[in-house]
Structure formats: structure tokens, C-alpha cells
Image: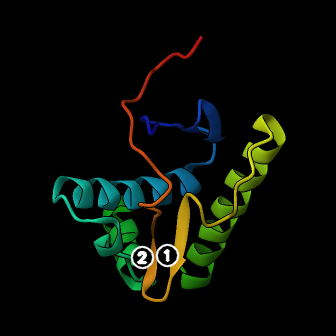
């Protein structure tokens, strides 16, 4: 579930609202994932986005100069690790770092083989 300031996997918060750079990157990847879903692509045709395209989109959304490539790669790496570690710790779920955000030869994408979109629920309690 991806909400205005939070990302949850299996009901567990994996990207909190105070992690703005990580949330921004995840939301861009998420939007591209939803675009491919709407286009009814089979999983093998879901697009991976280059780091350059991701940087371009971040700069466009932030209305400022392009972010540093190394920093964006660190954010993605941190996202992959944080999501996997959080789910292992909180749920005991066996998950690899590429199960949600996949690193591909051509770039990055939300993994269409293991991620299912569901409506955002503002309050799970």
C-alpha cells in the first residue's frame, strides 16, 4: 500500500513519513509500476527505469537541480535493505532485498512478480 506519506507491505510500515527522500523515490517507482499495470503488460514486460530517468523525475518533482547519482543509488540500496530487514524482523517473512524493488540490467522497478497493488487504507487499527 502506498499512501501520501507512507508505504506498507503486508500491513507493516516499511517507508515512514519522515523518510522523505526514500518515500519520493519509492513513489516514482510505484507510479511507473501502476502505469505498466494499467497498460496490462505481462510481468516480463514491466519496464525498468534507468538511474538517469529516475534522477530526471526527482529533479522535476523537487523543482531543483538534479540529485547526485551516487546519492540516488544509496537511497535505492537503503530502500531495498530496509524493506527486507523490516519485514524479516516484524513479520518473520523470508524476503530478499529484490522482492519489492528490483535491480535490473536496465535500471530499477517495482518487482511485478512479487508485488500486488492494493488500495491504501489510511488507518489499519
Specify the quadrant that holds the C terminus: top right
State the separation of the CA atoms marked 1 and 2: 6 Å
What numbered label is drawn on residue 67?
A: 1
What numbered label is drawn on residue 55?
A: 2
Residue 41 horizontal/vertical position (percent): 22, 64
Mark 1 secondary-structure assignment: loop
| Nearer-the-camera pick, 71 or 26 | 26
Mark 2 secondary-structure assignment: helix
Residue 49 horizontal/vertical position (percent): 37, 77
User: Residue at the location (42% across, 35% down)?
Assistant: 4
What numbered label is drawn on residue 93?
A: none
Q: Is residue 14 above or below residue 114?
A: above
Residue 106 horizontal/vertical position (percent): 42, 87
| Nearer-the-camera pick, 124 or 69 | 124
Label 2 neighbourhood size at 10 Å, few (<14), some (14-19), many (20+)?
many
Q: Contact (CB < 8 A) between labels 1 and 2? A: yes
Q: In this view, does 101 lie above or below 89?
A: below
Q: Is residue 65 among the parts visible in the rendering?
A: no
User: Residue at the location (32% across, 70% down)?
Assistant: 46
Q: Which of marks 1 and 2 is in front?
A: 2
Amino acid at each position: 500500500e502506498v499512501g501520501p506519506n507512507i508505504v506498507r507491505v503486508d500491513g507493516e510500515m516499511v517507508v515512514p513519513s519522515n523518510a522523505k527522500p526514500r518515500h519520493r523515490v519509492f513513489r516514482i517507482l510505484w507510479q511507473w509500476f501502476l502505469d505498466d499495470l494499467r497498460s496490462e503488460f505481462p510481468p516480463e514486460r514491466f519496464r525498468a527505469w534507468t538511474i538517469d530517468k529516475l534522477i530526471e523525475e526527482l529533479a522535476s518533482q523537487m523543482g531543483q537541480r538534479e540529485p547526485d547519482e551516487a546519492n540516488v543509488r544509496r537511497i535505492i540500496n537503503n530502500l531495498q535493505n530496509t524493506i527486507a530487514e523490516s519485514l524479516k524482523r516484524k513479520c518473520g517473512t523470508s524476503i530478499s532485498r529484490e522482492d519489492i524493488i528490483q535491480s535490473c540490467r536496465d535500471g530499477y522497478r517495482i518487482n511485478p512478480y512479487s508485488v500486488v497493488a492494493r488500495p491504501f487504507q489510511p488507518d489499519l487499527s
